[in-house]
Image: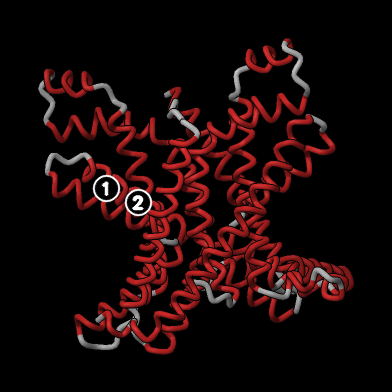
Amino acid sequence: MLDILIPYLPAMISGLIVTLELMLCSLAIGLLLAIIFTLISATGRVYLKAPVDVLVFFIRGTPLLVQIFIIYYGSGQWAWLRNSFLWDIFRHPFGCAAIALAVNTAAYTTALLTGAIQAVPKGEVEACEVLGFSRWQLLRRIIFSRAWRMALPAYSNEVIMILKSTSLASTITLLDLMGVMRQMIARTYEVLPFFIMAGFLYLILNGLIIGVFRLLERKYRVVATR
Amino acid sequence: MEPIKKLFISTLENHKFNAMKYLISFEGYGLQLFWGALTTISVAVCALLLGLLMALLGALGELSHHRSVRWLTLTLTALIRGVPELLVLFGIYFGGSALLTLVIGEDLQVNAFIAGVFALALIFAAYGAQTLRGSFMAIPGGQKEAAQALGLSSRRTFTHILLPQAWRIALPGLGNLWLVLLKDSALISLLGLSDLMNKAQMAASNTHQPFKFYMIAALIFLILTSLSQISFKKLTHKTIHA
């Protein structure tokens, strides 16, 4: 049964690469956004915090598929967007999927980081203030390093969620692993071998992510306290 | 009398017309979107009920005394949790049809509604089994022993002692899984079911206003998830204080 797959191996590998690119791109942008959002929330200014809260509420309350469609199909409705330099990003399914996934993971990671920062013991912060740490030193040395360790195990779940969510990009014609598989199925009318292969590849990627996080947790000596 | 009657009828018709106009607003797609939302809700609720049953079976399987049963359920749930939701959905719909055709020998197509419900239930159960297993394990062993000492049969011990307590512990976790399920139900439009997403897609392409109609779909989902969150909070409060 599996010999049907052999001629399509190069296409599958290119799909796999697109999936990985999409995942890493959106995770990098998403993590950056999440840190910015968390810092904004930490300032405690309502006019800064409210827009972030509304965005997080919207993202977490709506399906990712709708968000992807809003960005990919919805962006074409605005003439000013079509005429601006941003259209180079919004025109391509990869750009739209990356934006949707990045904002999505940013919203979930913000909640994660906020929780971790609130869990940093007050005494440690006070001790640093007594020792005369600057605000930046306090953030970098104590709050971020503690919060990073606390959030790491939960963040691995987020990364796996994003890997699985990249498959939705196939609905806006991106030829990621899922997209390639759907194309192959449409071409050959062979359903089962391609789905089994796709599932197998996603499971391998999952295993790799879990392995990387095990290593990271060992490196940063994360102790499971929960 | 005649002019008054005429006036009465005309106002009634006017009113009727306004009501109709109101119902079919959103450029005439209001009713369609409403029916679509109903389809989405019914798929999600059916999947929830089936998923709860399957999650319970999964939890019992994971807690089974037989190593083979334990191993089988653990592998199955890990497999489902490891692959994209879209793949599970397509696997059930297209793969199920291919399997049926292979087994029976005729060209068969699995019903999209049933395939959607089953796939969503399976995903719910793969996570729910873990939640339920955890809450069964959180019940002190003394509870079971006490029930045995009182002479309760093992079936009654399960339905009257263990299940109600496990349910209470699992409720917040299951609530979150329901939200995930509700959001995943947007995927069934890809099977061609005329759900909320499908209707929004139709309206978007006919009116050339994709942003507006996908935004409306998103807001309807937002209302549904917010309502679920509020009612889950109330339910949790009630069960804990019952």
Q: Position of residue A163 (x, y in %)?
A: 50, 58
Residue at numbered disc 1: B58
Q: Is residue B1 visible?
A: no
- Left or right: A64 as drawn, with respect to A6: right
Q: How many marks?
A: 2
Does residue B99 appear to the left or right of A167 in the view shown? Answer: left
Residue at the location (87% across, 68% down)? B4
User: Which label number is shown at residue B126?
Assistant: 2
Identify the residue at image location x=78%, y=39%: A50
Q: CA distance from mark 2 to mark 1?
A: 8 Å
Whole-percent x and y of residue B76?
27, 55
Check if mark 2 and mark 1 are on a common chain: yes
Residue B240 position in % (x across, y down): 44, 25
Q: Is residue A78 left or right of residue A10?
A: right
Q: Is residue A107 above or below residue A200?
A: above
- Amino acid type, callout 2: Ala
Q: Tag 2: Cα neighbours inside 10 Å, few (<14), some, or many (≥20)?
A: many
Asked if marks 2 and 1 touch (Cβ < 8 Å), the reply is yes
Q: Which sits in the foreground, A118 or B46?
A: A118
Give the image quarter of residue B150: top left
Q: Is residue B33 visible?
A: yes
Which tag, 2 or 1, sits closer to the chain's start?
Answer: 1
Please name the amino acid that badge 1 sits on.
Gly
Residue at (37, 60) in percent of width and height: A204
Which image quarter is the C terminus of chain A in? top left
